[in-house]
Amino acid sequence: MDNRIRVLVAKPGLDGHDRGAKIIARALRDAGMEVVYTGLRQTPEMIVNAALQEDVQVIGLSILSGAHNAIIPRVLELLREKQMTDVLVVVGGTIPDEDAERLKREGVGAVYQPGASLDEIVDYIRTTVKQAA
Amino acid sequence: MSKPLAPAPEYTTISGIPLDTVYTPAATSHTPPPPGEFPYTRGIHPTMYRGKLWTMRQFSGFGTPEETNRRYLYLLERGQTGLSVAFDLPTLMGYDSDHANSLGEVGKCGVAISSLEDAEILFRGIPLDSVSVSMTINSPAPVIWAMFLVVAEKQGVDWTRLDGTLQNDILKEYIAQKEYIYPPRPSMRLVTDIIEYAAAHVPRFNPVSISGYHIREAGSTAVQELAFTLRDGIEYVEWALERGLPIDTFAPRLSFFFNAHNDFFEEIAKYRAARRIWAYTMRDRFHASSERSLKLRFHTQTAGCSLTWQQPYNNVVRTSLQALAAVMGGTQSLHTNSLDEAYALPSEQAVKLALRTQQIIAHESNVAAVADPLGGSYFVEQLTDQVEAQANDYIRRIDEMGGMIPAIERGFPQSEIADASYQYQRSIEDRARIIVGVNGFEEADSEQIELLHIDESAQARQCESLAALRRRRDDDRVQRALDSLCQCASGTGNTMPHIIEAVRAYATVGEICDAFRNVFGTYEETSVL
């Protein structure tokens, strides 16, 4: 059986800046995970449906437009509606500290701000998914 | 405690060009002619900044048109010499503030503009016959430009006196920034419509700003930035010629926009090589005869992607060095980033410091007194030759693919950029490259800075004023204008007069872009990882 960690990397909202999402997708793949990249301009509904269909353990959201406070709570809500709260949600982007804290209280596993290290992100996902298994 | 630095670093530029310990006269076989002479390697004017300093133009916009108008008046009062409008994502994507897809995005990355009424508020109290305005807008560029033209008309300013720049560079959207609506070919038709209309009616306006900035921000090297940008320029020229415009009627108004990143000398070499490649291209490939067609004019912005979250005050120093490179490379206008932009849109204090940085370079350092001060440097001349040769190699490869649109369709520039950006990130991760405060000289405690906070109320206020406008305007007139626009879009005529009429009737950005969506369809890229 393939026990590689499955991750959905998604770009929600209208923001087209996909440099970070693509780098993370490659880094997770290089670390041996199976990565599905949704492409641009995904609504929360599209992201949660893709996560369900691809049966992923992790959703990584990259958002740099400042719309995180409107978009991410909606993703979490949909995950709860579909009983998918076991899916780890990780967020990266220009998220101010206070927003990052609030998102974590609402159910996001980790928030990575600019300058975060790839190895740190890989380690966090690996450790957290293993603990949950 | 900081970790010890990695041992012997590799001595190359960011683009990977190997660097010698020292350069000697053997480095280059030629000395370029003086500034103002073909191929303009050393600058487009003989006296450069003695004749005219660069335009200090800070890109800004946020929240509602009222808020942004106040920021513009603030900047103009403090000595800024031109405006540069940043639009929010819904506007950039051709959605009104009250569209479902605009949720959470209104006023966040720039100002929300949905109708002529918003544009009237945006430019209130700003004399458009004396302040030049740059507008960073691409897919909906003809709509926003039409709004600008109608506002000028209402101010009583003749279009022949309007000075400014429309970004209107759709190709780099497919390559890098990804804010496209329609497929490439109909998008190129709209770009060409604007070039044609500007040449005939708004002759002092730059209808396209061919942009490497976003290509670089997406992670390209300096060489890729240069090559893809100039090849995009070639594509616009070919489409305009195909339209039947004589080269010298539009080429003098093509302008460029480059990034200023950390590698000081490589950036200077990039600007010098850009002028040289463009001059030869215009003369030899397109047989331009007007000297103005041969001269590459450009705006520069310091590299947003080089700013760090850690130790944000270090960003002031980075920006100063990048701005200095742009000036020593002969830029015509400049935006300096603010220290807080890794976090958010800049605060008023941070923007002021960024503007002061330019003023200190201009008035205190004395670097503006001499044109191309590095000309004749063994190192800079050789590096210019190397950057030029590598960029020309990319341009030739794209020519062989049949031009930029086929290259985009097969994901060529996209995958070159993705590879470069991953390698760059890896080099930071492996500490082959040190970024101060990030992977060297780190500190545990982060410095706190005050940030500009844009709340969700902008969306509510925009939706309210938009609803009031929709009630007030003459819907029959709007519908007639949109119908005639669709008809024109389905044929081959220039769409600009129809867009201007729709704007005058207070049709919104969303409605006009929807009319085009119905005729042209929309574009989905195949993601290249």
Image: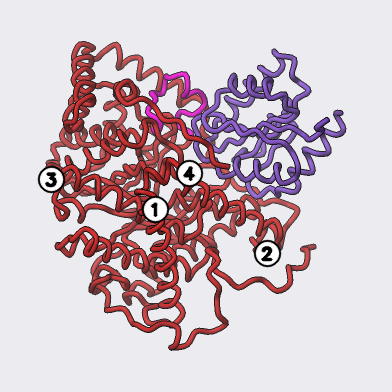
Chain colours: A purple, B red
Q: Which residue is mark 1?
A: B398
Badge 3 marks a residue whose secondary structure is helix
**In the image, B426: left or right of B17?**
right
Q: Position of residue B224 (x, y in %)?
A: 46, 57
Residue at the spot of label 2:
B432
Question: Disc 4: which chain?
Answer: B
Provide the residue span drawn in magenta. B92-108
Q: Is residue B525 visible?
A: yes
Q: What secondary structure is the magenta-colored segment mainly?
A: loop
Name the residue located 65 percent from the left edge and 48 percent from the top edge.
Answer: B448
N-term-proximal mark, 2 vs 1: 1
Q: CA distance from mark 2 to mark 1?
A: 31 Å
Disc 4 target residue: B411
Q: Which mark is residue A84?
A: none
SS at badge 4? loop
Q: Amino acid at mark 3?
A: Thr
Residue at 25% over, 49% down: B238
Which residue type carries mark 1? Ile
Secondary structure type for disc 1: helix
Queried whether the magenta region covers residue B107, the answer comes back as: yes
- The nearer-to-camera label among 4 and 3 is 4
The residue singled out by tag 3 in the image is B160
Q: CA distance from mark 4 to mark 3?
A: 40 Å
Image point (26%, 37%), residue name = B189
Quarter of the picture containing the N terminus of chain B is bottom right
The mark nearer the N terminus, 1 or 4, is: 1
Q: Is residue B132 visible?
A: no
Q: Are marks 4 and 3 on the same chain?
A: yes
